[in-house]
Amino acid sequence: MNHDAYDDNYIRAILNSVKSIAMVGASPVNVRPSYFAFKYLAQRGYDMIPVNPGHVGKSLLGKPFVASLGDIDRPIDMIDIFRNSSHIMPVVDEALKLSPLPKVIWMQLGARDDAAAEKAEAAGMKVVMNRCPKIEYGRLSSEISWMGVNSRTLSSKRAPIPTQGMRLSLNRMSVGGGETAASDRAAKNKSEP
Amino acid sequence: MTDRHPGFSTLAVHAGAQPDPTTGARATPIYQTTSFVFNDADHAASLFGLQAFGNIYTRIGNPTNAVLEERVAALEGGTAALAVASGHAAQVVVFQQLLMPGDEIIAARKLYGGSINQFTHAFKSFGWNVAWADSDDIASFERAVTPHTKAIFIESIANPSGSITDIEAIAAVARKAGVPLIVDNTLATPYLIRPIDHGADIVVHSLTKFLGGHGNSLGGIIVDAGTFDWSKDNKYPMLSDPRPEYHGIKLQETFGNFAFAIACRVLGLRDLGPALSPFNAFMILTGIETLPLRMQKHCENAKAVAEFLAGHPKVAAVNYAGLAGDKYNNLARKYAPKGAGAVFTFSLKDGYDAGVNLVSNLKLFSHLANVGDTRSLVIHPASTTHSQLDDAAKVKSGAAPDVVRLSIGIEDKEDLIADLEQALTA
């Protein structure tokens, strides 16, 4: 599995199939990126579970924080890890103890641990590294295009009618668009000093 | 199946645009509206807090403009873009994100005269200083670096001289200095040169020129390459530090590799205000669909006209990088193999007066202060676009008093050559 670049279909299939997402490292502070992503995904119908031992007893947008993945009382489809690369492996080890096993391990923008990815994949889980599910959802639905961002998708098909006002559907037919090779190279150089 | 990358002409037609989900309209609609309704109070708050993607007010973003932004970002190989009212507005917005009073930029001396004025005079009143360097002498950029340097600015193909800049060599200087390289790619367009492929971190354009291409609409754009780490040295607080106007959001942390484009939008455009009209965005978008076809014709015509002038007894010199033997021909072959653009200068043996006569005798070339139109254009830079420079600075910027600038259009080249022939002999 090439983790430098993902096919749109791989990402779209993950975002279309998962229903419950445990976000490890979710922050209740409303200017943190994890808060943005948590709120965005919750508004798109995902069953979001904030995981952060520092905030047990509080809740995030009405969802109570849990201390660890083991404390979650229902099956988790995806674990979205909002921690830096050095904290990924313990989360994956914890995920491997869950039953049923989560389907997807997702590491946030800037986070990458190839050994952890290999371990998760060996157990049958799908892995995404160094991406943000909010940005990917926005990109594949083309919502992010409203911000002038290169969605790297093209489509000649009428997209599904927006739901809930301005929310665009993930289920849009598209092909790959303009690449951003220089940015990908820069990100790779940064992760391999 | 692996995603394949579409070609340039496909992106020029499709990138950013899709059938409207509600009406099915295939061409991009002109969203001629100031504002956009919110779903509810929380949606409004989310948009203002940068938590959601969406439209608020056309000064900050507009769906027609967004199609233009995504299209140019895709053509340049960038992560995102921001369209603004003019090329000059693009430069102010870019530098407002990078510079504090007392900071410096290094700029190539061979620049559009309007940029030289903007940097020299308008920027001085903001406390932003410019150090000038010579694109033909890469070491002059290195010598100009100081602890206050925050960016390097060059043109890929310089206006008016048509000279080609060694982008990779200057990108190396920028990398060593730890500052972004900003490339004005107006005269090349991404069809001829993609500066990001050669190390640029930010690309700016006057969309008014070849991208729009029809001389009917002003516009400018900023493209974020997504390559620069704004938080590394704490030199760019607008990108790396908590922003008080957004309750403490850090833009690079939140928006990753398109943070610069977002900063330009939510700090620059929002607060300085040079928004692009959606109607202009529509006109420019329509122009971009034919950019590859037009640029081929512009370059083919320019080469033919340059060759004609080079062989004319009344012409002293032609500066066109597409000519074999031109000082910049090697750089043109490396950076712009599809053509050296369509803006260049030449000088007449009989000097300034002959240049003035030529301009007044031309019947197809229009005498005006623009470039990159379907129509062929002519101007005498020393008395117009570069008139505010002293004589020495005119020569250094490529606008010596005896120089005439042409912008070759997409007419039949035989007619352009005949017009020049009659004007030279009149």
Image: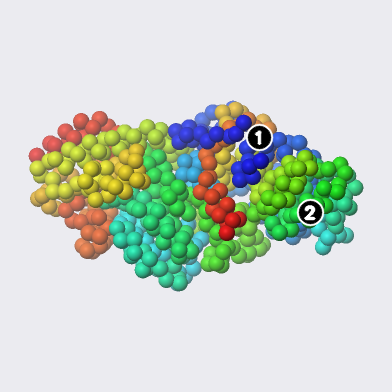
* Residue A64 appears left or right of A36: right
Location of the C terminus of chain B by quadrant is top left
- Vertical arrangement, residue B149 with respect to residue B304, above or below: below
Position of residue B172 measured from the top left corner of the image (x, y, whole percent): 42, 58
Q: Who's the residue at 43% across and 39% down the image?
A: B284
Residue at which label 2 appears: A91
Q: Who's the residue at 52% across and 36% down the image?
A: B5
Along the line of sight, which residue is nearer the eye, B95 or A174?
Answer: A174
Position of residue B12 measured from the top left corner of the image (x, y, whole percent): 46, 35
Along the line of sight, which residue is nearer the eye, B279 or A111?
Answer: A111
Residue at which label 1 appears: A9
Q: Chain of mark 1?
A: A
- Vertical arrangement, residue B258 with respect to residue B25, above or below: below
Secondary structure beneath dot 1 equals helix
Mark 1 crowdedness (10 Å alpha carbons): few <14, some 14-19, many ≥20 = some
Q: Who's the residue at 42% across and 71% down the image?
A: B146
